[in-house]
Image: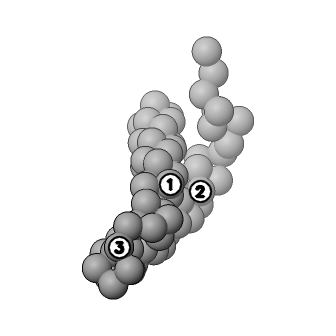
């Protein structure tokens, strides 16, 4: 079965990998910020929706990391 990245050229894959890595860094920063804010909000007001907000965004980080892994595998298969 062909990879979803098999139609990309090597240069496009490298460019996509760099872009994806920067998105992951931004996502990690935002997720950590949400966790900190959730902790402070929980201490101030008790448990609310804000307490669980980081849990809704955490899976997106894992999807992004999985996509980076797939891009690296595709690049390694072409080397």
* 29 up-or-down from 67: above or below: below
Quadrant that contains the N terminus: top right
* 58 up-or-down from 26: above or below: above
Q: Nearer the viewer, residue 64 or 53?
A: 53
Tag on residue 16? 2
Circle 2: is it few (<14), some (14-19), or many (20+) Cα within 10 Å? Answer: some
Sequence order check: which comes first, mark 3 or mark 2? 2
Residue 9 location (% of width, % of height): 66, 45
Q: CA distance from mark 3 to mark 1?
A: 19 Å
Q: Which residue is mark 1?
A: 56
Q: CA distance from mark 3 to mark 2?
A: 41 Å
Q: Which residue is mark 3?
A: 46
Sequence order check: which comes first, mark 2 or mark 1? 2
Q: Nearer the viewer, residue 58 or 2?
A: 58
Q: Nearer the viewer, residue 3 or 75?
A: 3
Residue 64 location (% of width, % of height): 50, 51
Residue 57 location (% of width, % of height): 50, 58
**Residue name at image x 64 percent, y 53 percent:** 12
Q: CA distance from mark 2 to mark 1?
A: 25 Å
Circle 1 SS class: helix
């Amino acid at each position: 079965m062909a990879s979803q990245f098999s139609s990309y050229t090597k240069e496009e894959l490298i460019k996509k990998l760099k872009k994806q890595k920067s998105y992951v860094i931004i996502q990690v920063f935002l997720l950590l910020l949400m966790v900190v804010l959730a902790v402070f909000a929980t201490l101030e007001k008790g448990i609310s929706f804000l307490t669980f907000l980081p849990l809704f965004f955490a899976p997106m980080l894992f999807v992004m990391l999985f996509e980076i892994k797939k891009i690296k595998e595709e690049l390694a298969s072409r080397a």
